Amino acid sequence: MTTDSPAPGPVVGLRREREVLAVALATHRHVVLEGPPGTGKSTLLRAVAAETGQDVVFVEGNAELTPARLVGQYDPSAVLAGGYVPENFTDGPLLTAMRGSGLLYLEELNRIPEETLNVLITVLTEGEIAVPRLGTVRATAGFRLIAAMNPFDAIGTARVGQAIADRMCRVVLGYQPEEAEREIVAGITGSGARQVALAVRLVRATRQHRDLRTGSSVRGAIDLVLLLDGLLRLRGQELTCGRETTRDAAHAALSGRIRVTEGVERTPESVLDEILDDVWPPDSAPPDTADGAPSGGGLGKAPGPSTGTGPDRADTPRADRAPRRAPRTTGRREMQLRHEAFSTVSPEVGELDEEAFAGLMGADPDAAAALLADLATATDRELRSAARRLAARVFVQVGRVGAARARGTRRLAATRRPEGDLDLDRTLDRWTGIWPPVAEDLVTRHWTGSRRAVCLAVDRSGSMQGLGVAIAAVAAAGVVLAADERLRTSVLTFADDVTVLQPHGRHRSAEDVVLALVGLRGHGRTDLAAALQGARSELLPATADERVVVLLSDCLSTVGEPPESALAGIDRLHVLCPLPTEEAVDAARLLAARGGGTMEPVGTLADLGPALTRLLG
């Protein structure tokens, strides 16, 4: 926790965001700042706080932030000596900010456990909090809560509950314009305009490249300039002959910051080489980018797929290549008959208009998801490749937003293990009166939860196409993303045989699992017993208190043994029934009841998130 307000750095750009934040604070609103790393959330807050003369109480959000650590707690030794009096209470950051007219800044809001966030509800609404044994603490007039979160990071995060979101204004920060990023980099590095402009252009290109899921923030440009300047001095070079030095600096500064889209078999370094070739073609002078004029390769649009990597690839600019024209295939005619929006999303052979798809996704998510799932197996190879890359992003994002596991899977529990926070009340109840207390008298509280192993079994028999494949892909992404130290997951598909996509105990990214699923098409008969036996084989080696199978199927078995004969070794069987018919719902409900679980019908993508949350939470 930090209670002082260091001198804020200069805020470049962000005029609108700064005005909105200042007015929100002046009108007694609480605010969440949302945006990717490096967009200036902390700098913006500290600048506004400095203008108003308020202190900032900083709290780093993480899974170990308990209510007691946020609110405060009684000092155990002082209580044993003098009892529960206010003087023996140590304020946490929340009470420090409430009593001192300060701004409470919660970093990484979506990493904080729900039990901890719940203590803020009354504070945000009434400006007060009731603390056991201490009484009600009311906030002074200047108190405000400012939270920050990165919406694109899925590891260790969860959705912020509506009770909190409804009580806060939301200010979204994006990446700065190119001129502002140059000013930021120049101000921090003090480097020449040419190096700064080159670094900023390279970094901004990483955010547009079609093979990258995540590009670099402006921090990458800062590091790139510092490394480039240092290497040029060390090697006695000028920038004009330092292309390979720029390449070395870019690899070091950016390769760890960018993320290649899953399913694209490229290294970060090869993508950076391609971007450098576009900005600064081999055997040419460095681009004259100091004045912002375009030069080198076209960075106005995302670079297309390369024909190779590094300097040996073809150097013909993509804009000079003739567009590929080919007669419409049977596959395209079938797509047009099946999907009304097909010609809008793919107007030409090999073309996938992502803006048109985004519009369709906003207007009709189910139709868009069904189209994308079918495009992933299109006859048109280029279209199929583009659709799979897009599916890996879209279905994982839907799985991340809609199928996030409930925070309530972890709770604060009393224990006699020497870890966690001291539970003073229970300790006093056990205390024999001997001073100092012996270890056996101490009771602590720490986050706990039952360990579970979950296997998702996806039916890929004849009915799996279109929206059914999309639902399966999103479900798989949701299950993989839900995994943590208390929940181990695996994924398999089945028809009359079983294929394991995500083995238990081995990490495979959600994007990779989605790519494998969208490449499948329905075929064969349905052997539910084989699916359950395969899931049991995945779960048996797991160290878990409960072994759970989530079956995504209509449960209409057409071959093999009766499915109830394969339930041994499975503690609980839940069923997700996609595109449910009356017959399928009856069969799914009966099988789930025999497996001690529940059945959830899933007719649309909107049904899937809440259903998975109920089953995995």
Image: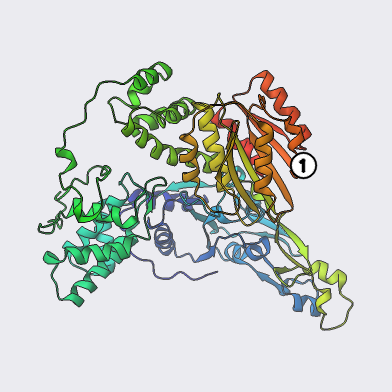
Quick check: can you spot residue 318? Answer: yes
Position of residue 286 measured from the top left corner of the image (x, y, whole percent): 13, 59
Task: Tell me: 309 left or right of 492.
Answer: left
Residue 429 vs 179, above or below: the answer is below
Position of residue 270 measured from the top left corner of the image (x, y, whole percent): 29, 55
Residue 61: image quadrant is bottom right
Position of residue 17 measured from the top left corner of the image (x, y, whole percent): 38, 50
Number of numbered callouts drawn: 1
Q: Residue furthest right?
A: 432
Position of residue 570 measured from the top left corner of the image (x, y, whole percent): 74, 43
Q: Residue at x 82, y 80 (%)?
A: 437
* Kind of residue at badge 1: Ala
Quarter placement of the N terminus: bottom right
Q: Residue at x 27, y 69 (%)?
A: 226
Task: Tell me: 179 left or right of 575.
Answer: left
Residue 91 vs 514, above or below: the answer is below
Mark 1 element type = loop
Q: Nearer the viewer, residue 36 or 578?
A: 578
Quick check: can you spot residue 132? Answer: no
Q: Nearer the viewer, residue 584 or 144?
A: 584
Residue 486 vs 298, above or below: the answer is below
Check disc 1: other Cα within 10 Å, few if <14, some if 14-19, many if 20+: few
Q: Residue furthest bottom?
A: 435
Coloration of the structure image:
rainbow
Quarter placement of the C terminus: top right
Task: Tell me: 487 left or right of 313.
Answer: right
Q: Nearer the viewer, residue 408 or 168?
A: 408
**Residue under pointer 1:** 568
